[in-house]
Amino acid sequence: MSDLERLVRFKLLGQEYSFYTGASEAELEAVFALVKSLIEENVGGAKGTLPVSKVAILACLNIASRYVQMEQEFDRYRENAERRIGKLNERIRLRLCDE
């Protein structure tokens, strides 16, 4: 554990979890809010009827799905940006050759 890490505790579905992290308070709040909203989304009206492990797996799958989608979007964005930069570089090269 580094000097910057601290013990963090949070409660979810009636269970307390703790871990060490160096993440900022704002980052932790965002993570906890996302996890809680995904848990609530996956539990829906079935609170108490689904095992915690199943809810956790559903939330993990949801997070993984969002991650993969964002990764694909980023790859498309990067490819588009590289293509546009290449076109701009070619236009600049042609202009410089004309002078």
Image (cartoon, grey):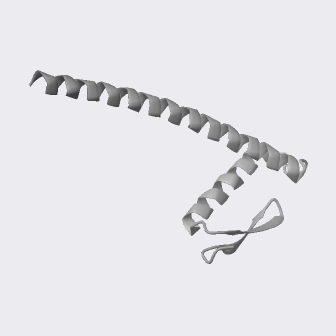
Q: Where is residue 56 in the image (x, y as percent from the top left)?
A: 80, 50
**Residue 44, can we see it?**
no
Q: Where is 20 relative to 89, above or below? A: below
Left or right of 71? Residue 37 is right
Q: Where is 93 relative to 47, above or below? A: above
Left or right of 88? Residue 5 is right
Q: Which of 23 and 46 is in front in this view?
A: 23
Q: For the point 84% across and 51% down, which residue is it?
A: 47
**Residue 41, can we see it?**
yes
Left or right of 98? Residue 88 is right
Q: Where is residue 66 in the image (x, y as percent from the top left)?
A: 64, 39
Q: For the point 27% across and 29% down, which residue is it?
A: 89
Quarter placement of the N terminus? bottom right
Most extreme residue toward the left is 99
Task: Locate residue 78: give its quadrant.
Answer: top left
Q: Nearer the viewer, residue 63 or 45?
A: 63
Quarter placement of the C terminus? top left
Q: Position of residue 90 (x, y in %)?
A: 26, 24
For the image, the number of numbered tags is 0
